[in-house]
Image (cartoon, rainbow, N blue to C red):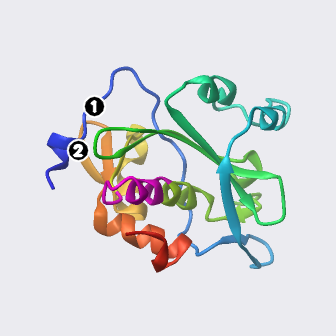
Amino acid sequence: MHLEKLIQPRGASTSVGIIIDELTPCLVHRESGEEYKTIYEPLLKSDLKKLTKNMGWVNFNWKQELSISDRHVYKLLIKGSDEIQGLISFQVAEGYIDVFLVESAPWNVGSSDKVFIGVGAHLFAIACKFSFEYGFEGVIAFTSKTNLIEHYQGKLGAVIIGGHLMAIETARAKELVDIYFGEEDHT
C-alpha cells in the first residue's frame, strides 16, 4: 500500500504529543506492578465535568472536540472504574483512521509520579482496532510534534508520510491490536 497516496495532509491541525512509555497487555500500576484490564467507551457529555483544568486536564478542549460531528472520542477506563485514564479523538477518513488528539490522564504523565504505565500505546491500539473494523487494514495517521517523530518511530513503529504526518501500517497495527485486545479482535 502506498500510504503517501492514501493519506492526505490536513490543514491547520493539532499535533500528537503523548509519550509512549511501554507496550503492555493492560495497564500496569507503576509502583506495585499489578496489571489492570481495561475497556474503552465513547466519551459522554456527562464525562466532561471530570475533564476540567482543576482536575489537571489542561492540554485540550474535550468539550469542543466532542461537539465536532464527525469526530469519535473515546475514553480508556480500568474495568470496574469510571475514572478516565486517557482519551483519543479520531475521524474516519477515506481508507484510514485520522487521529487528532491523544491524551493521558494527568496522573498518568511523567516518570516518577505516574500511576499507570501503558496508556499512550493503548490509545493508539484503539484507533488501529477501529481501522481494522472499518476495513482499513489497521492503518491510522496522525501529525506528530517535531520532537516526538523518532519516539513514535521507535515505540509505535510509525512511519513518516511527509513532514510531521505519520502513519501506523497494517503489520504494526496488528501487533498493537494483538497486544491490547488479543488476536481474535481484528480481521
Q: Residues within 10 Å of mark 2 (few under 14, many from 20)?
A: many
What's the amino acid at mark 2? Ile
Q: Which residue is mark 2?
A: 161
Amino acid type, residue under disc 1 in the picture = Pro
Instruction: Indicate the position of residue 101 as horizontal and vertical percent values.
Output: 53, 38
Numbered disc 1: secondary structure: loop
Lower sequence index among marks 2 and 1: 1
As measured in the structure, the alpha-carbon distance from the residue carrying label 2 to the one carrying label 1 is 9 Å
Is label 2 in a helix, a strand or a loop?
strand
The part of the chain drawn in magenta is 127-138
Q: Is residue 140 magenta?
A: no
Percent position of residue 118, x then y = 61, 65
Q: Which residue is mark 1?
A: 9
Q: Residue at x 49, y 30 (%)?
A: 70
For the question of whether residue 11 can be seen, the reply is: yes
Image position of 158 with respect to 172: above or below: above
Q: Is residue 46 shown left or right of residue 140?
A: right
Q: Are marks 2 and 1 in contact (CB under 8 Å)?
A: yes
Quarter residue 39 falls in: bottom right
